[in-house]
Image: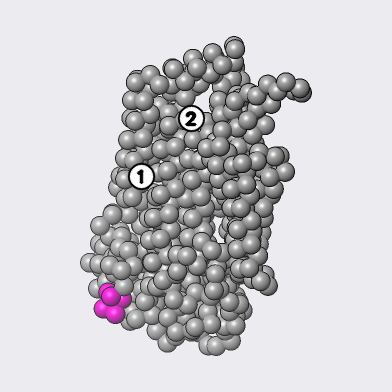
């Protein structure tokens, strides 16, 4: 009786119109945050609105739900907030893709744990009826709708967790970027998916523990098998896709917890992540269904040897580069992951300012997935106060390389590799690339000739007659160019 009245009191409080209004305001803040994050100019405002919305949602939830004692809640917030603060302060922009993948894994794991807690103690979540038999102990019967929500939530959460772990390991270099193609992987994946869905359907009529835990185990395995066959060139799409999965997992758990804010937020994250994944697939000329199906149709590439090609190449100096760019009418700068690793964006902006003083038109060309994550280069350039009107996306600037005197490529390989257009055996074949080789002169900043890009493919542009290789740390090379220009 007491438990039932407590649950009714909580639900009565949650049904308060002011509570609904608070969740509505939080949802609007989340929508405006997504809109703000679509542009570097409004990204800071978008972040602020997202934090405000989350603050409103958290406070409203704590007020309307008897979750735990106040000291326990404050301790949990302090632990989680402290970890987040330390990570945010210490993490470098170069590690942001794998950090995002790691955070997605935590969201997936949280969904699994919430589903497990709801299954083990459904009355505490208000999703079960207590049955008192004439003989034997009372037992809780979970509502059929809640079983569907629980089954979907734990499955999506488990897939998100294990898939994100593999994505993190690949992005962090603990696993190779090449696809790991298991024999019969598509048959295995389809069997696991079919088995999981069949068990969820069975779970609606039978809440036996073995069904719930089997769904969880199969989903963990499915998440692992879906991501291992996806190569490094498609990893940015994978990160976005896992972001979508984490949102749907949160939305499913929102239904279980009767929390409107979680449902709205999860649906927003899930839908926006799916849309972003689709946009990225189109930008990379990839099949959306193929990527989300675990590299369906991928084959082991016979071309694209990871070793450097044994061909003659030209080496230049900072003074050579400064002279060529100072004499140019237009210079297009192509930043890549190597620029981020060296933290060369501030020196690069200084170089661009000096060239503009010499009367040179300076533009920045950004590939949709440069830096292993959408918007990575835009954020770094904005951090260095590069004017927004000088930064152009691939489709807006690619045609200009043919009329450009100097293409200055700093730490980018895969996104400038012509093999994507010509070599059908290459793992990056079909991906749109920046046509830097069409410029009169290509200056390529690279640590050494031995390294290759994330996809493990050497770049033919290194060996062309119009290319000059500038072998050094990106930041050091740009600083030397700045001195030569001064």
Residue at 32%, 54% (x, y): give it. Answer: 386
Q: Is residue 203 visible?
A: yes
> Which residue in the protein does label 1 denote?
34
> Which residue in the protein does label 2 denote?
258
Sequence-wise, which precedes: disc 2 or disc 1? 1
Is 153 a magenta residue? no
Residue at 56%, 37% (x, y): give it. Answer: 144
Nearer mark to the viewer, of 2 and 1: 2
Instruction: Answer with left or right where residue 410 lies relative to residue 397.
Output: right
**Residue 131, numbered label:** none
For disc 1, the neighbor class at 10 Å (few under 14, some 14 to 19, many from 20) is some
Q: Majority secondary structure of the magenta segment?
A: helix
| Residue 449, image quadrant | bottom right
Task: Determine whether 265 is above or below 140 in the image.
Answer: below
* Picture coordinates of residue 441, whole percent (x, y): 36, 79
Tell me, what colour scheme is on the image?
A: one colour
Which quadrant holds the N terminus? top right
Instruction: Answer with left or right where residue 379 lies relative to residue 327.
Output: right
Q: Is residue 87 visible?
A: no
* Picture coordinates of residue 475, whole percent (x, y): 48, 60
Farthest top residue in view: 2
Residue range in magenta is 399-404
């Amino acid at each position: 009786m007491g438990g039932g009245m407590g649950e009714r009191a909580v639900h009565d409080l949650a049904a308060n119109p002011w509570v609904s209004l608070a969740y509505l305001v939080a949802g609007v803040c989340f929508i405006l945050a997504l809109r703000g994050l679509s542009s570097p100019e409004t990204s800071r405002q978008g972040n602020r609105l997202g934090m405000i919305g989350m603050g409103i949602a958290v406070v409203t939830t704590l007020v309307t739900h008897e979750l735990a004692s106040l000291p326990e809640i404050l301790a949990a917030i302090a632990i989680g907030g402290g970890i987040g603060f330390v990570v945010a302060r210490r993490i470098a922009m170069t590690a942001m893709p794998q950090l995002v993948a790691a955070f997605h894994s935590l969201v997936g794991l949280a969904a699994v744990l919430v589903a497990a807690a709801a299954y083990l103690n459904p009355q505490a979540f208000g999703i079960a009826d207590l049955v008192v038999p004439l003989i034997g102990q009372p037992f809780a019967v979970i509502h059929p709708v809640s079983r569907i929500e629980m089954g979907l939530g734990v499955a999506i959460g488990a897939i998100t967790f294990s898939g994100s772990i593999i994505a993190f390991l690949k992005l962090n270099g603990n696993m190779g970027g090449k696809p790991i193609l298991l024999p019969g992987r598509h048959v295995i994946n389809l069997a696991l998916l079919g088995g999981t869905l069949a068990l969820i359907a069975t779970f609606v009529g039978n809440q036996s523990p073995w069904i719930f835990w089997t769904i969880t185990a199969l989903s963990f395995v499915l998440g692992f098998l879906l991501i291992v066959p996806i190569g490094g060139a498609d990893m940015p799409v994978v990160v976005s896709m896992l972001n979508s999965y984490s949102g749907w997992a949160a939305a499913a758990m929102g239904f279980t917890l009767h929390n409107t804010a979680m449902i709205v937020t999860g649906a927003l994250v899930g839908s926006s992540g799916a849309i972003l994944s689709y946009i990225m697939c189109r930008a990379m000329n990839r099949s959306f269904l193929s990527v989300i199906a675990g590299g369906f149709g991928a084959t082991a590439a016979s071309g694209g040897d990871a070793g450097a090609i044994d061909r003659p190449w030209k080496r230049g100096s900072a003074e050579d580069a400064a002279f060529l760019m100072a004499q140019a009418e237009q210079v297009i700068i192509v930043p890549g992951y190597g620029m981020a690793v060296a933290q060369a964006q501030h020196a690069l902006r200084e170089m661009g300012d000096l060239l503009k003083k010499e009367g040179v038109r300076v533009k920045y060309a950004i590939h949709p997935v440069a830096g292993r994550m959408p918007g990575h280069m835009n954020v770094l350039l904005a951090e260095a106060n590069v004017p927004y009107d000088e930064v152009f996306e691939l489709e807006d600037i690619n045609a200009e390389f043919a009329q450009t005197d100097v293409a200055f490529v700093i730490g980018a390989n895969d996104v400038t590799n012509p093999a994507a257009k010509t070599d059908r055996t290459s793992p990056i074949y079909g991906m749109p690339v920046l046509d830097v080789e069409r410029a009169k002169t290509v200056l390529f900043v690279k640590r050494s000739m031995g390294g290759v890009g994330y996809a493990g493919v050497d770049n033919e542009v290194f060996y062309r007659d119009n290319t000059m290789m500038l072998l050094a740390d990106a930041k050091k090379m740009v600083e030397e160019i700045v001195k030569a220009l001064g």
